[in-house]
Image (tube, rainbow, N blue to C red):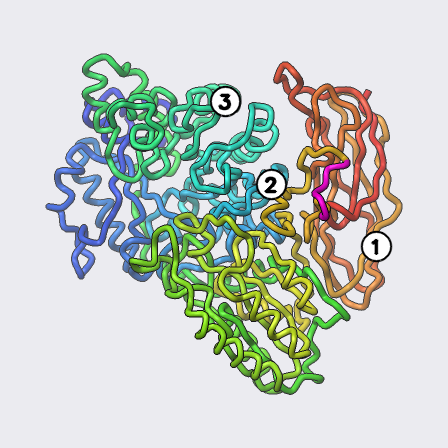
Amino acid sequence: MYKDPECAVEVRIDDLLQRMTLEEKVAQTLCVHVNPDMVDDEGRVRKRRLHTRLRHGIGQLGKPNQVLERTAEESAHIVNRLQAYVIEKSRLDIPAIIHEECLHGLWARGATIFPQSAGMASTWDPELVGSVFNAIALETRTRGGTQANTPMIDVCREPRFGRIEESYGEDPYLVSRFAVAAVRGLQGHGQSIGDEHIVATVKHFAAYGEPLGGLNKAPPPSGERQLREVYLPPFRAAITQAGALSVMPSYNEIDGVPSHANAWLLTDVLRGEWGFKGYVASDYGGIEQLHANHRIAATPSDAGRQALLAGVDMELPEPHCFPALEELVQSGRVPLRVLDQAVRRILRVKFLLGLFENPFADPPKAKRVNRCAEHRALALDVAHKSIVLLKNKGDLLPLDRRKIKRLAVIGPNSGVLQVGGYSVEKPHGISMLEGIRDKVKDCIEVYHAEGCKIHLGSGYWLPEPMVGKRIRLNEPKRDAAMIQEAVEVAKQCDVAIVVVGETPVTCGEFIGHRCSLELLGRQNELVEAIGATGTPMVVCLVNGRPLALSTVAETAAALLECWYLGEQTGAAVADVLFGDVNPSGKLPFSFPKSVGHLPAYYNAKMPPDARYLMSDRAPLFPFGYGLSYTRFTYSNLRVTPPRIKRGGRAVVGVDVANTGKRAGCDVVQLYLRDLVCSVTRPPKALAGFTRVHLDPGEQRTVELPIGYDQLACYDSAMKETVEPGVFELMVGPDSVTLQSTQLTVE
């Protein structure tokens, strides 16, 4: 019966579950991470390496596309052989879920590399980002992947944290909109998952994005109210609105309880309050850390027991703690019904994926769709919209080809392609130098100088002994000589484009957590030296976090925040520099003046008169900020109706006009504030946004709805409620430049 696709999913689960032995049930909660020695040079499975590990079947296989480093078609063939062997070894022919990393593209050779998450967030265009994840799902599924350990939907408010590049910003509403878009893009819109979609795994649940000191896995400074109002909303939206089928707990603890053992979080809230029907898959080694790091479990076996009872259903990436479940059930320390519930959740997703009917990849289709022309064009479109114009003194940008004879392209990130974390070691694509040269090859001479080093070594993984507590910087004398060489290049040119920033090492999961937000190495010295030449200077930032940019912002005539733009980096930046594309990105993070100005997020609860001695608290660049090559004006702000009752709805309207000479796009942003409440509320909170494209001289009325539930708070009894009173509604192009009106809730 369980093999009959005409039967209801729950009936199929019941039938299969009652056929399974205890050993087979435990095997479904386990994962085997693929490694290169599991296949030979011809891509054939070395069955002896897997025989013992798969003797009762397996729940998941991990990352074959990333690890094996083959072409899309070759990878699909190998994954098919691995899957066939899993089914062969399973007495009941149960296929494996195959998970991959898909943060901004499938992490695999030959897949499309899209802009990093921080860049995608700068588009403020969830629909476009949904299209990105639809493409990622297609490329992954055709190669045999059926689960993405993606998206990362942590609200990140600590720029020292190296994983901030993986986030969609500092605001829960903004992150929630991208969370829903990403999940729908990966999974599709139906209850079942079609053969061009995959399971989305929302992570890291919860409160992972604001660790103490910016240090990975450190606990967050939050109570339950902040947890519910800031960190949980993206997960709630991803599950209740988009139907995410997998959740990954965070490494950190919350109020003394690690997330991998937090029954309140994984059972009471996730399943009880939100009705989650999927499975919880541990982060890599997260269960083991209950014993090794958190020290709440005396043994790995006890760590497995605590995790399963709390609500974790599957252990990634290798069987370490969960194999003990067999003995724990037999001894009565874990009830069989708890194990059955975990296996039921895993099997449900396998049935929804259609794995029992079609468990295999499609090699010819994989070859056709991976990095197809449509996906490369989409990557370019997203890269265009990810770029944020932060400064443009004297309208230096866009550059006029007719007025420039010699152009300097300088900087440690100018001639290399940096695409950010969770991507291939040697990415394919277009560097800024290549993109600019291609753009002006018929009319402008381009000169190049590296200028200085960010650090020694390159790539996502630095060789030992560079990895560790420190990385090696360049010799000061060598950097000084490189800077002087760049100065001589800049002097003979009409404009200098200086490309500085970070690497996947200096900002990333593994060692990229910093106590400073200044540019690493001697990059500030390079910027100042080029600025001193008098040659007009455009600085392009390639980075993954908000940086302290006072030196750069003061010295540069124009400043572009480019983040990691993916494989189309050079083409996208060249299009913006020379005006073929008008920049429209907006910052998803506030940029502090210095690390001493943290926290810098736009709606921190601070006294109205809070300031530092000899410095105000205002960020260098605020949340939602971004300029254009044209000008926009806002007028005639109104709310209809001005008073609503319980369950009501209002619409905020504003007239937006393009008063410049170029067509352009602005992001209209709506913020709200509860003027009087029984608990403290933030000074403002994002409540809506939309992109509007206007031709020169065009004016349009933009309408943004406000739902009753958006006015809710958690009162002193921790009950979600809307209190009657007056709410201030604010609209503008960023979180600072705002006009306001009022809405009364009766």
Amino acid bearing label 2: Arg
Q: Would you name the residue on which mark 2 appears?
A: 177
Amino acid bearing label 1: Thr
Q: Would you name the residue on which mark 1 appears?
A: 633
Indicate left or right for 23 with 243 as reference: left
* C-alpha distance separating marks 3 and 1: 44 Å
Let me know if residue 78 appears in the view.
Answer: yes
Q: Nearer the viewer, mark 2 or mark 3?
A: 3
Magenta region: which residues? Answer: 609-615
Residue located at (52% from left, 33% from top): 235
* Spot occupied by residue 9 in the image (x, y as percentages of width and height): 38, 27
* C-alpha distance separating marks 1 and 2: 26 Å
Residue located at (77% from left, 67% from top): 662
* Spot occupied by residue 529 in the image (x, y as percentages of width and height): 60, 74
* Mark 3 or 1, nearer chain start: 3
| Magenta-colored stretch includes residue 270 | no
The tag on residue 269 is: 3
